[in-house]
Image (cartoon, rainbow, N blue to C red):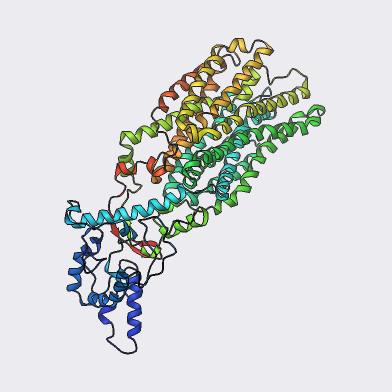
Amino acid sequence: MKRSRYGREKSIWRNAPRGGEDEHVWKDDGRRRARRGQCSGEPAQKEHQLNVAGMPRCDWLPRAPLRTCEALCCNPGQVQLLLLSLPVRLIRCFPIIFPLPRSSSHNRPRGLIPPATSFPELAMAAIVETASAEKRTSSSENDIPALPSGRRANHSAALELDERRRAALAEVDNAKFSWFHVKVCMVAGAGFFTDAYDIFAINIASTMLGYVYGKNHALNTNQDLGVKVATPIGNLVGQLLFGWLADVLGRKRMYGVELMIIIIATFGQALSGQAPAVGIIGVLIVWRFIMGIGIGGDYPLSAVISSEFASTRSRGRLMTAVFAFQGWGNFCAALIALIVVSAYKPLIITDPSTYPHVDYCWRILIGLGCVPGVIALYFRLTIPETPRFTMDIERNIKQASQDIENALTTGSYYVDPDAVVQRVEAPRATRRDFLAHFGKWENLKVLIGTSYSWFALDIAFYGLGLNSSIILTAIGWGSSKAPAGHGVYETLRNVSVGNLILSVAGLIPGYWASFLVIDSWGRKPIQLMGFTVLTALFICMGFGYDKLIATPSAQKAFVFLYCLADFFQNFGPNVTTFVIPGEAFPTRYRSTAHGISAASGKLGAVVAQVGFARLRNIHGPNAFVGHILEIFALFMLTGIFSTLLLPETKGRSLEELSNENQEGFIQGVRQVQVKDGVVVQE
């Protein structure tokens, strides 16, 4: 059998038998083809098929336009099919006498293609003839737009298909919070837990590495900078790479790959060794760069997956809950460091060869970071593709509807996969389209706003987060004057306790404060508030630095202000700079744009690390820390202005936020070959 453009065998009306025992086979075959939406007889003119939705109705053929009637007069095969369908038409004319059974999907939203029926009359209409006919009133020639007939029908068909697409996506937007959302939150959050643990554990591990491998029991400036900046540089690469790949290959296909990279690199760090040809610090820098690539890939993937699965009313809370695992990762890094140091306390204090025991401590601390990643790996590899990617990029209507039904359905949505034979002409993710989309100021300003806001925030966030041990030591919190092993233990313990206090008092409460109000206040007000308060706090800490570290009571005030800064970073721009890029861009560029925004943030982290390392010892050890805090205040001030470029995303669908109407998302339709609801040839 030859294949038609619809993926079905061509009609055999011309060769059909005129009587005999095979006649019923011929009739059944024709009815089956009619159910699938194929016109019988000679292939109708393409214009006849496409113009059905826009043409005026004929009185004697209720569901066919005038051009179809003209085609029937010229086509004996279609006349035969019309005669077969007359009994059905008569029944439809007298529904009281001959009531027809109601379809189980009679409550579905209007505009969706109905399930296949046994009426051969459907062969008279083009595939774009859908249940939306219910809401049509009798039209006249004056009701038809002044467009060429082909363009008019093409536009109508495009709107029909987009209506069905939007109805499917509305099912996701209106879904109630379910266990599937909890699963998405836990699976994505486990990755962020691992990310934060691995990033911020180096805070304490660098002090341990200094005792074991550094001269004078401390890493020099370049070594300390190398182990701290390698991960943000890897983050930058991973965010750009995985953000682009997730838009090209799919979210599901890449989700889990980045976690495997993190697991392997974490094991590699824990098992690193010293050799005459290569120092262990160099090996650690390489492994932390590789780990950073995996961590960077987790940002756009987790953000986009959680946003595309979430309903509109709870999208902000779901994404914030995912990101809040970062605070728990930071907390656990400090807690495990304290536990490990306490476990080795007798050996560190009593054994003259103290430093080999500290070597065990940092390896255990770093190595345990892969445990949550291993647990979450299976669930990441088995999570379904997001319906938005499946529908808008892969155009697999059947799979998208099946995923929605399995995970998020409310029971009001139906898609007939065999009816999908025309396809919306939508913009493709190409270089030219990317430049055209972001060449418009209203789109470009959003990307600039998300990118610079994240850049400014991460200068302070990572400037404090990766150097908290140095800052605590500078104000006298983490140092110890006890002799030998007692001094090593006390220093490590104080650094661990200090980081634990900062995470409990500032980081974790800030994340969950954002969680409570992000869908009621909105993203933009929280970000503006956070940048404003942070500007004031860093001004106080910077210009009052000398007085705040002068006495023990003043040091406590400094730690309090430090905790407030941590709190308003997370009850502020640290959360919103993650959430907004996952909402404000079209599906075909959502992951790429989030990766660009996140990479800008990690560029800020690199700038903060390099600047902190080069500036802090000007005029003496840690003498320039106060001025660094003043620089942080300046960047927080600029973040206020970049926030003004951003839209408010609260309560708006992803399609509304992506400016589809602005760029003409619906450009027309074209015929495609379909098999079981899947486009197999365009």
Image side of residue 121 versus residue 570, left or right: left
- Residue shown at the point (68%, 29%) measured from the top left: 208
- Could you say which is closer to the camera, residue 597 or residue 177? 177
Res. 658 image quadrant = top left
Q: In the displayed image of the protein, which residue is found farthest to the front?
A: 96
- Residue shown at the point (48%, 52%) measured from the top left: 385
Q: Can residue 509 be seen at all in this image of the molecule?
A: yes
Q: In the displayed image of the protein, which residue is found farthest to the bottom?
A: 20
Q: Position of residue 504 (x, y in %)?
A: 65, 29
Q: Is residue 61 above or below residue 529?
A: below
* Quadrant position of the N terminus in the picture: bottom left
Q: Can residue 222 be seen at all in this image of the molecule?
A: no
Q: Position of residue 324 (x, y in %)?
A: 57, 36
- Could you say which is closer to the camera, residue 452 or residue 525? 525
Res. 447 image quadrant = top left
Image side of residue 125 versus residue 605, left or right: left
- Could you say which is closer to the camera, residue 250 or residue 207? 250
- Residue shown at the point (49%, 24%) measured from the top left: 529
Count the marks: 0
Image side of residue 69 versus residue 479, left or right: left
- Could you say which is closer to the camera, residue 59 or residue 312? 59
- Residue shown at the point (45%, 56%) measured from the top left: 412
Q: Position of residue 27 (x, y in %)?
A: 33, 80
Q: Is residue 201 above or below residue 545?
A: below
Q: Position of residue 8 (x, y in %)?
A: 34, 70
* Quadrant position of the C terminus in the picture: bottom left
Q: Is residue 325 above or below residue 500?
A: below
Q: Is residue 469 above or below residue 125?
A: above
Image side of residue 71 versus residue 112, left or right: left
